[in-house]
Image (spheres, rainbow, N blue to C red):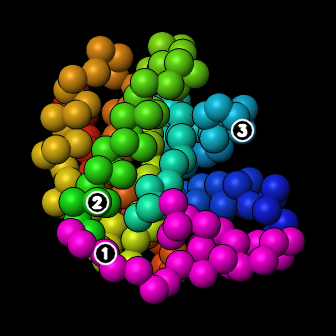
Amino acid sequence: MVKRRDMKSAHEDAVLRQFKAHLESHGSRLNMLDRPEPPEAICELNDKRTWIEITDAFFNRDHAIGLTSFASDDMDHVPDDRRLVIDPDAMFSSVLHAVIEAKYDKASMQKVAEAEGPGILLVGIFTPFVTAEAVAHDEADSVAILIASKAVPVFGTIYAYEGTGQRNFHVMYQREA
């Protein structure tokens, strides 16, 4: 367990390590060059300079508080239970689109993309109702439509990954060359 103020950094470090291992298991090489914040990392992927940003898509605010308070050793756990959920797929789809769009619209992300070119976005999938693999598959078309409406090509690739447990990474969006 970690202190709440250290949780973001510990989470990002773990995701970057696991993403590197994922890429290497598929024959790619990822070399971290810098951790400027933003973005989370400037790196070389197969000898090509790129950058990585990490964001999380929680099912909803109560779920986010429940997970983060449980993992924090300096705050009381606030359970996320005893509520009725109707149409969880639509609820989560809306959250997913909102977090991706927020990254595209963020001035600091646009500035990094202008300086470095389109980067890689890793989206943590935090919902008990669906896997990252299913999200990457089911949301690919709607995410591509969302991205097509944006003037600045901030990300060239977007991965969905399991927010808890074994982190598997799945391409949700790949910009055409």
Q: Are marks 1 and 3 in contact (CB under 8 Å)?
A: no
| Disc 1 packing (10 Å; few <14; some 14–19; many ≥20) | few
Tell me where the magenta segment starts and ends, as one range: 61-87
**To which residue does mark 2 refer?**
91
On screen, residue 96 versus residue 19, left or right, reads left
Q: Can residue 35 be seen in this view?
A: yes
The amino acid marked with disc number 2 is Met
Where residue 129 appears, x then y in whole percent? 31, 77
Q: In this view, does 158 lie above or below 106?
A: below
**To which residue does mark 1 refer?**
85
Of residues 38 and 42, which is closer to you in this image?
Answer: 38
> In what quadrant of the picture does the C terminus appear?
top left
> In what quadrant of the picture does the N terminus appear?
bottom right
Where residue 167 appears, x then y in whole percent? 48, 71
The residue furthest front is 83
Q: SS at mark 2?
A: helix
Question: In the image, what residue occupies the spot 63% across and 41% down?
Answer: 40
Q: Do the residues labelled 2 and 3 touch (CB within 8 Å)?
A: no
Distance of label 2 from label 1 (alpha carbons): 9 Å
Question: In the image, what residue occupies the spot 66% across and 77% down?
Answer: 78
Give the mark toward the camera: 2 or 1.
Answer: 1
- Residue 78 drawn in magenta: yes
Question: In the image, what residue occupies the spot 44% across and 56% down?
Answer: 57
Where residue 128 appears, x then y in whole percent? 38, 78
Q: Do the residues labelled 2 and 1 touch (CB within 8 Å)?
A: yes
On screen, residue 146 versus residue 67, left or right, reads left
Point out which mark residue 35 bears.
3
* The image quarter in which residue 67 lies: bottom right
Q: Is residue 160 above or below residue 49?
A: below
The amino acid marked with disc number 3 is Arg
Of residues 138 and 84, which is closer to you in this image?
Answer: 84
